[in-house]
Each structure stands twice: as C-alpha cells, then as structure tokens.
Image: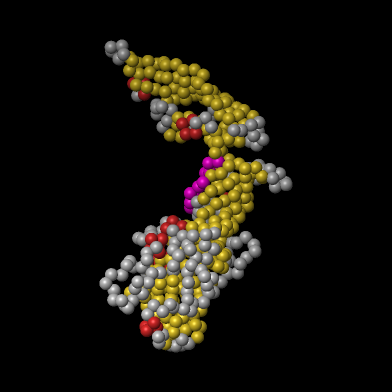
C-alpha cells in the first residue's frame, strides 16, 4: 500500500497524548499478500490481508484509518497467525469526535515480528463475465473463451491481490456502502464523556462469510492465461483466479477465465409471426454438460459475442451477440443471435371459406368450420445448410390440419404446431397445409 493511499495505517496521531504516553504505537507495514472475495450480488467484498507487526512486550496500540474508502469499520478484525497464545487483541476502540479512525489495543508477551491477518468488508468492487464464441467454418462446433472484468471503485488500491468471485445471491441486512459512509462506525456518539472511547467487541457481521474465504496463500503472477479454480459452496459458487493481480482504484481489469475447444452446437432459425413479426431469428444452443466438453461448474451469466471462422487465415465474421443468465450444470442454453436476412420465411393465405354449417330450430347458425389454405415459402440464401422451425398459432384449440409438400408438423400445445424444414445451401422449399378450425357447436 502506498503511504499516501486512501486507507492509511500509521503511527497514531496524538488524540489524547496523556493516554498514549506509556504505550508504544505500532506502525502497520505494507501487505505481504491480500485476497479479495467479491460478492457481486450484494456490492460487498471480503478483504483478507497478511502483514507482519513489530510488537513491543506489553501494551501496543495500532491505528487504522478508512477515510475516503468504502470500508465498513464495524467489520474490522485482526488475528495473530503465530504465537497466538502470547498475543491478545484486547479490543478495537473508536475515539469520540474523531471520524474514520479506529485503534486496536494489543497486549503482547513477546517482542518482535508477529504475522497477523486483518480482514474487513468493503464496497465498490464489481465483476462482470463476458464470452467470445468462435464457430467452426461448418458451424457445428464452437470455441468458447470466457473473461471476467473486475472494477475497483472502493477508494483503495490493492496490489498483487488474489481475486475470488462469488456466483449466487447473498442476503445481508445492511448495505456495506451505507455502513462505510457513516461518520462514526455505530452512529454519532451521544452523551459520551470527553475522553472516553467507544469500545466495540465481537465477531462482526462478516463472520457469516468467512466459511468461503480461506487463508490467503501466495500465488506468483503468471504470463500464461490464468486458470480459474471453481468450488461449490452450498448455494454459492466460488471462482478463484490463478496468480495475483494489481487492481487500482478507479480502474477495471480484464482477466481470462477459461477456454474450451470444439463444443458441439446447434444452429436453429425460428419463425413465429406473433413473437418475431416477419423476421427469421437465429438461435445457437448447447448444453452445460460433459458431452459438450463443459459441465464441471455453473457458467456465470454475461454477454456472448459470436464469430465464425471463415478460412485457414483465421479471418472472422461477426454472427451476433446474446446476453444470457446463469447456467447451472446440466442445463441447456439457447442464445438469441437476432434477426437474419439470408433465411426467409413467407407465409401466404391462398384460400379462405366457411363450411359445414349447423342450424338451430329457428334457422340460426350455431356451428361452422373455417377452412384456410396456406403456402409457406422457405428460402436459404446461405452457403451452408440450415434448419428452420416455423410455428403457427391458431385462434382455437379445435382444429384439424392436412399438409402436403415439405409439411410434416409436430403439435406443440392445444393451439400451436411447428414445421421443421431442412434446406441445403442456396435452396428453397414450400410448406402447404389446409387448416380447418371448428366454431360454435361444431367445436363439440
């Protein structure tokens, strides 16, 4: 940490000189290592730092200032990592009428360097996943590359930090950013004697999160793309990025996540007038399972940019993009790549008539059939074969249908059918059908 950084660990300022006259003030040295566990859904990050304190035998005071940061001072905790039986963290005090300042009282039976771990919650970190998919020239497989962009607006630089990302919803009672912005950690002190500090003890709110944050371990920076270690943690999922990264305040950093070659994919072109209008929409689908060379972990939601490899010179063509939500293991994912112009579906009503009337005793019509004849032209202007799914929605669940040409259909629900047409490159086909809908007593 830079000495001029937003969070300052330093020799204590003489707030009450008499109180400190016989007590050694401890300077907190720079971090040996730091670990960030970012809970994106709650705007909350658990920070764990390893440092070496130089303690004197007897009473020591260690000052902590969180000015200009989004650190929650109520979550501060320090633990000795060696000679814990000889070092006692007595309490953490917040001097009255002094904002953004805390003081640890430490009793030590030994002199010298003692490794400690300092942990706290901060706000202002966020991460977002995004992906690049590159289709093979025949569009049957895809190379999937994942990335994570981490943004630091916490007010503090974190150098050589191990970064861990939490996927899943976290429930907290208080917003960390709101706790961090208080002038005093537990609100403005009322009726406090002039020289009496506010003393707070306990395990703090962050203890509920410590089960997913292990002791900081060193990890050298890597020149190769970083591996992400993935672990399931009850309703959460933890992604640990290989190595360490320096993430400065106000900066964003893109970190490689994973790369998988040869994922089998299905391209499907859909036409449904009620949903997409007159457009044909392209969909790309695969499954998060081992058969598709995935399936070890859930896939965080994000934006996927899809390209197609055109030739041996690695030229690419942009095919579309789609935003998707969290994909659990074993789940299918269907990505909407948007409308296309090179696959065309054109339905035409060729004939319409009413027939098979039923009358009551008074001669009024109480039942009839409506008979509609449709022709659907399907054109493929691509140099690759395509599969087109055409859905037709009827106004009633009472119907019969007769097809001809390339008109094999499948019933989807009470009032919907779909036709699936396979087209070779630069070809066209026709679907013809006669739809009879029954109305009034004819529906019975």
x, y percentage for residue 249? 52, 62
| Residue sitting at the far right | 313
Image side of residue 51 versus residue 182, left or right: right
Residue situated in front as seen by the camera: 311 or 149? 149
Residue situated in front as seen by the camera: 244 or 146? 244
What span is colored magenta in the figure? 323-337
In the image, what residue occupies the spot 49% across and 58% down?
A: 126
| Residue sitting at the far top | 363
432 over 215 or under it: above or below: above
Residue situated in front as seen by the camera: 337 or 175? 175
In the image, what residue occupies the spot 39% across and 80% down?
A: 105
- Residue 332 counted in the magenta span: yes
x, y percentage for residue 205? 37, 67
Image side of residue 244 versus residue 80, left or right: right
Q: Quadrant of residue 203?
A: bottom left
In the image, what residue occupies the spot 72% across and 46% down?
A: 312
């Amino acid at each position: 940490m830079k000495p001029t950084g937003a969070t300052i660990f330093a020799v204590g300022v003489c707030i009450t000189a008499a109180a400190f006259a016989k007590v050694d003030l401890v300077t907190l040295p720079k971090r040996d290592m730091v670990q960030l566990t970012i809970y994106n859904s709650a705007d909350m990050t658990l920070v764990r730092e390893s440092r070496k304190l130089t303690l004197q035998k007897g009473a020591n005071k260690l000052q902590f200032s969180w000015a200009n940061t989004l650190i929650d001072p109520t979550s501060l905790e320090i633990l000795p990592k060696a000679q814990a039986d000889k070092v006692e963290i007595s309490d953490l005090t917040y001097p009255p009428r002094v904002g953004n300042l805390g003081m640890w009282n430490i009793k030590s039976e030994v002199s010298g360097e003692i490794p400690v771990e300092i942990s706290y919650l901060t706000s202002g970190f966020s991460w977002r996943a995004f992906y690049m998919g590159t289709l093979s020239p025949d569009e049957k497989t895809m190379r999937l590359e994942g990335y994570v962009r981490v943004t630091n607006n916490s007010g503090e630089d974190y150098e050589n930090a191990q970064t861990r990302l939490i996927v899943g919803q976290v429930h907290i009672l208080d917003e960390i950013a709101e706790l961090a912005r208080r002038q005093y950690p537990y609100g403005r002190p009322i009726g406090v004697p002039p020289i009496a500090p506010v003393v707070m003890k306990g395990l703090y709110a962050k203890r509920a999160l410590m089960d997913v944050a292990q002791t900081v371990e060193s990890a050298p920076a890597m020149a190769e793309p970083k591996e992400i270690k993935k672990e399931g943690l009850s309703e959460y999922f933890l992604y640990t990025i290989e190595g360490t990264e320096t993430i400065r305040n106000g900066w964003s950093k893109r970190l490689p996540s994973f790369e998988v070659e040869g994922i089998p994919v299905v391209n499907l072109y859909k036409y449904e007038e009620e949903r997409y209008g007159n457009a044909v929409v392209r969909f790309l689908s695969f499954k998060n399972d081992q058969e598709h060379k995935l399936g070890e972990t859930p896939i965080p939601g994000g934006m996927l940019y899809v390209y197609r490899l055109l030739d041996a010179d690695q030229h690419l063509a942009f095919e579309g993009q789609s935003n998707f939500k969290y994909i659990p293991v074993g789940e299918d994912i269907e990505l909407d790549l948007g409308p296309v112009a090179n696959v065309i579906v054109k339905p035409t009503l060729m004939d319409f008539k009413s027939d098979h009337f039923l009358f009551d005793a008074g001669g009024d019509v109480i039942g009839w059939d409506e008979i509609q004849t449709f022709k659907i032209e399907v054109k493929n202007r691509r140099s690759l074969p395509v599969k087109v799914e055409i859905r037709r929605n009827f106004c009633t669940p009472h119907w019969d249908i007769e097809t001809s040409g390339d008109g094999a259909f499948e019933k989807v629900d009470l009032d919907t059918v779909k036709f699936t047409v396979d087209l070779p490159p630069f070809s066209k086909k026709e679907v013809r059908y006669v739809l009879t809908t029954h109305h009034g007593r004819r529906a019975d």
